[in-house]
Amino acid sequence: MSASLRPAAVLFDCDGVLADSEAVANGAIADDLSERGWPMTMEEAKHAFMGTALPDIRHVVERRLGAALPEDWSELVVARIVARYAAGVLEPIRGAATAVEAVAAAGIPMAVASNSGRAELRAKAAILPFFRHFEGRLLCFEDVARAKPWPDLYLAAAALCGAAPGNCVVIEDSTAGARAGLAAGCRVLGFAQDTPAADLRAAGVTEVFHDHAELPALLGLGRMAA
């Protein structure tokens, strides 16, 4: 790939892109909602809420149940999620660590922009060693006025890296996150693992990949060693 593709910064989503955490988080949400009278499986929660921040999920749940959730509902759900991480169920997405190391070795600034909350994001960062490359540049929905699909997180992440959004590449696996990256003016690479490539393209993504081994070449860094 041409070196002209080399970005000023790479801005990663977290869940489903770096951390294999979608099943854990959505399983915790499904368990909570099932106990509250909305029977739900992990897969159903994933389909309904993938890429959505808890405050926005809360609005959907309250409309569905016709009643207000407890004030500390988000904290209760996060506590379930973090406990499952602590029990050893959190793994990196295959190839993510090697891809992040390749970007770091190229000297390109990186940030994480996640729709998860601060406690959950910090728990993932403490478990996955390659998150050391994002020290000081971990952003969650609590750091901005509006969560994805609004562009706020990616605009803030670009600023943390000292880069103009138009010179940044966003790595996203959800349609909400893809829309956020595009709205921020970034080049978006859609990671089609949990989300079908067709859905990412429908959200406006023109470049889709399926394996992190493809990422260095897409960033103009050459191919990743096998």
Image: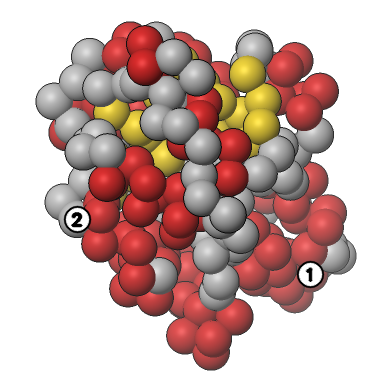
**Amino acid type of disc 1?**
Ser
Residue farthest along the bottom direction in this orientation: 87
Image coordinates for residue 4, horizontal then vertical, percent = 36, 11
Residue on which disc 2 sits: 135
Which of pointers 2 and 1 indicates the residue nearer the eye?
Answer: 2
The image position of residue 100, as x and y in percent, is: 39, 49
Q: Which residue is mark 1?
A: 34
- Label 1, residues with CA under 10 Å away: few <14, some 14-19, many ≥20: few
Total numbered badges shown on the rendered structure = 2
Horizontal and vertical percent position of residue 95:
56, 56
In terms of depth relative to the viewer, which is nearer, 54 or 36? 54
Write the residue at 21% across / 38% down: 107
Q: Quadrant of the C terminus?
A: bottom right
Q: Is residue 104 above or below residue 176?
A: below
Q: Is residue 53 visible?
A: no
Q: Amino acid at mark 2?
A: Glu
Hey, which quadrant is residue 29 in on the image? bottom right
Cα gap from disc 2 to disc 1, whole angstroms: 37 Å
The residue drawn where x is 47% and y is 85% is 86
Judge whether 161 appears above or below 120 on screen: above
Q: Residues within 10 Å of mark 2 (few under 14, many from 20)?
A: few
Q: Which mark is residue 198?
A: none
* Side of 8 where 221 appears, left or right: right
Q: Is residue 197 left or right of residue 204?
A: right
Q: Earlier in the sequence, mark 2 or mark 1?
A: 1
